[in-house]
Amino acid sequence: MDVIRAADGQMVTSDMLSRWCEALDKDEWPQGEHSVGEAISGRPPLSAEGSAVLSVKVSPAMKRAIENKAKSEGVTTSDFVRSMLASSLVGKG
């Protein structure tokens, strides 16, 4: 990762990220930087178009299998199912 563009348009380099991490690890603001607001808790939206609920009935055994697989991969059941659906759709081209 050489350069990325931040949401505000600022170009951010790997070197900048390293300096910021070093400063923040010491509980300091990086030189020349400042807070632009409060930290926001919570997960960002899944997409710009929002989200919709999809209700699917599965057997109790399949539900447990999905939950166990998601847990073993360290993700939520919803994230696991979304990933599986996306992979299936992309795979079908």
Image (cartoon, helix red, strand yellow):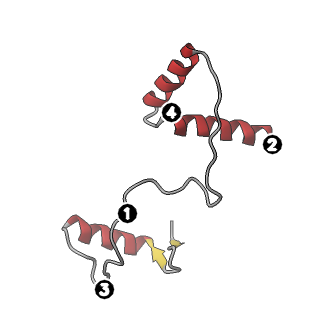
Q: Secondary structure at mark 2?
A: loop
Mark with earlier residue (4, 1): 1
Distance from label 4 to label 1 (Cα)? 24 Å
Q: Mark 4 or mark 3, which is nearer the start of the sequence?
A: 3
Q: Residue furthest bottom?
A: 32
* Closer mark to the observer between disc 4 and disc 2: 4
| Residue located at (60% from left, 15% from top) | 59
Task: Identify residue for label 2.
Answer: 93
Instruction: Specify whether 72 is left or right of 5.
Output: left
Q: Name which of mark 3 and mark 1 comes first in the sequence.
A: 3
Q: Which residue is mark 1?
A: 40
Residue located at (45% from left, 74% from top): 13
Residue 49 point in image, percent of width and height: 65, 58
Within 10 angstroms of label 3, few (less than 14), some, or many (20 or more) residues? few
Secondary structure under badge 1? loop
Q: Residues within 10 Å of mark 4 (few under 14, many from 20)?
A: some
Looking at the rendering, which quadrant does residue 36 occupy? Answer: bottom left
Quadrant of the rendering where the C terminus is positioned: top right
- Residue 77 circle label: 4
Between the C-alphas of marks 3 and 1, the distance is 22 Å
Considering depth in this image, is 2 or 71 the residue closer to the camera?
A: 71
In the image, which disc is placed on residue 32? 3
Say which of marks 3 and 4 sits in front: 4
Q: Nearer the viewer, residue 39 or 4?
A: 39
Q: What is the number of callouts on the image?
A: 4
Who comes first in sequence, dot 3 or dot 2? Answer: 3
The reply to whether discs 4 and 1 touch (Cβ–Cβ < 8 Å) is: no
- Name the kind of residue labelled 4 in the image: Thr
Q: CA distance from mark 3 to mark 2?
A: 47 Å
Mark 3 and mark 2 residues within 8 Å of each other at the beta carbon: no
